[in-house]
Amino acid sequence: MVFVSFCFRAQNRVNPSDENYRAAKFRGEELRVTREEIVVGLDIGTTKVCTVIGQGIAATGAPGEETGQINVIGVGVVPSRGIKKGVVIDVEDTIAAIRDSVERAAHMAGVQVEGAVVGVTGDHVQSSNRRGTVTAASPQNAITRFDVERVLQAAALEIPRDREIIHSLPRDFIVDGHVGVKRPIGMTGQRLEVETHVVTGKASFLQNTVKCVEQAGLNVEALVLEPIATAEAVTTADEREMGVILIDIGGGTSDVAVFVDGSIVDSSVLPVGGNHVTRDIAIGLRTPFEIAERLKIDRGAATRDLIPHGEALEVLMAGSGERLRIPRALLGEIIEARMSELFELSREAMHTAGVRKRLAGGVILSGGGALLPGALDLCSDVFQMPVRLGLPNEISGWSDQVANPQFATGVGLCRFALAQRYAPGNQSAIPAIASSEGRRIWGAIAPGPLSQAAPPETVPDPTSETPLSPDAEQNNGTRPDAEAAPQAKISVANAEATAGDGNATAPDAPATAPTLNRRDNFLRREETAPPASSPASQNGAAPSFWQKIWVKFRELIGFEAP
């Protein structure tokens, strides 16, 4: 029996007379009540597919709020098939593995699952720190939730067309030059800036992952970069404030995330993982891959100093089937060489971020590769920092099933969903690019070719401005507030039709005119605007002054001959 997922949500009523409710309304915020939800984290890795079903209190977005303990009610783990280095290489095998993993977790939890937060990784993932700037939309210069959404989108405007945004995580806000603002909503200011950490991925690779999850019977609530999710499970708020670097050693890749002052400053995916260590053993000792994996787990060590002098082991030779006796120190040398390379690449990522002297929290190792004996000591020697093993914290229920670095990403996906679902700017914190709506939102930022037709029900980009006629500008002289601003976009056809009296509607004009970018706006104006010589302008009514100006403008730019 295949379970299809479903999220249970218990909502509490809001008392309008409550002081916090009135204060939030005064600041222009939407008060989120405490609610307990069931969330699903789906970790699709190179070696395993892990589904974790957790239950916890969703954060309301209040300053300093923590999600608290997560009650793990279901876990499903199956060997991964069809994934290599975080990228789908076989759709059918990937779908089967996802379906099997979700079915096991749902059976343990006794629930049906409808949607999941999916972790993504791979060397196609790129990150950068960007800055966005907007002007407050409120006439009173009060910064609202809508302004935060606008500035986060403005920071991610210049994205190549073949990439999609996974995250736009705010690091710091700047209000009228005042830096270090963490929560600008409710403050007074004219200029709002933000420093964000933008993570993008190859659009085709992300869409293949989404397709596999959807064909397995699930809705993708969001795509989350795996090291960011893992940090939610294995790091504390104090460590992120002091500065810490997280290294999650997976099978095909290793994920690195650097945190300073409570915010992420750098993230990267290294094309080196545990499978590379196994492959080195198989090639160096000329033994089958399965035997090499067992040797790594049972007899291997990340440093040869941990191997007693003179100890030997027998290795089954590939092809001939003969058993060869070799010193165990040789196995340690092979493993140490590859693990040293991994930690040196991670150290380079730290130097790239330029925060070497600000990582008082040291290094945290997570993932299956962190369980290799001697990995912590070798990492400490390379970084010259304190190193600890990252285990999922603040968990209950089936905690013994997930109290392992291998399950840190699955638990972190659940915690990240609870922490960010109702946070201000959550569309950018957890962009649902997996859903059709989310893809339309980011598609407006990274537009396609001009010949590409706009998809139906496209969500307009709040950062772009639709050209209006002068009369229409007079009729819309008041700037929209936080709630009305997204709906303030009117179609170009209606804008031109209201040029005469502000109320007339052009014949057969569409109700909405979704656009991809300003260039498409301009072309669509030419398609929808009635010609000056059309019956609409010869119905007996004299053209207005602004209609005459519009006709002259069309003649000047060459769209219509005089």
Image (cartoon, grey):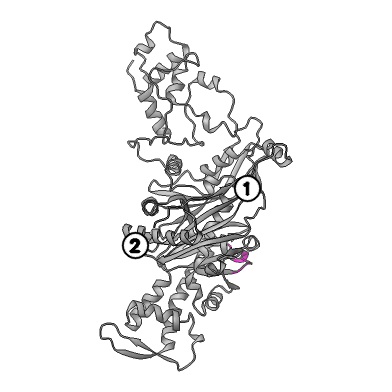
Quadrant in the picture for residue 516: top left
Work out whether residue 438 or residue 304 is closer to the camera in this orientation and state it: 438
Going by the numbered disc 1, the residue's amino acid type is Thr
- Tell me residue 400's x, y (percent): 55, 70
Q: Answer with mark 2 or mark 1, whichever residue precedes in sequence.
A: 1
Work out whether 363 lies above or below 12.
Answer: below
Magenta segment boundaries in residue numbering: 354-362
> Quarter of the image containing the C terminus?
top left
The tag on residue 228 is none
* Mark 2 neighbour class, 10 Å CA radius: few under 14, some 14 to 19, many 20 or more: some
In the rendered image, is residue 85 in sight? yes
Per the image, the residue denoted by label 1 is 60
**Distance Cα–Cα, label 2 vs label 1:** 38 Å
Find disc 2 in the rendering and name its residue: 82
Residue 285: image location, x then y, percent? 34, 83
Whether residue 474 sits left or right of residue 336 in the image: it is right
Q: Observer-nearest residue: 486 or 132?
A: 486
* Quarter of the figure that contains the N terminus: bottom left
SS at mark 1 in the image:
loop
Task: Count all numbered tags in the image, as a single digit.
Answer: 2
Judge left or right: residue 237 versus residue 377: right
Q: In the figure, 73 relative to 559: above or below?
A: below
Q: Residue at x 50, y 73 (%)?
A: 370
Count residues near mark 1 (Cα–Cα under 10 Å), then give few for <14, some for 14-19, many for 20+.
Answer: many
Helix, strand or loop: magenta stretch: loop
Q: Nearer the viewer, residue 430 or 51?
A: 51
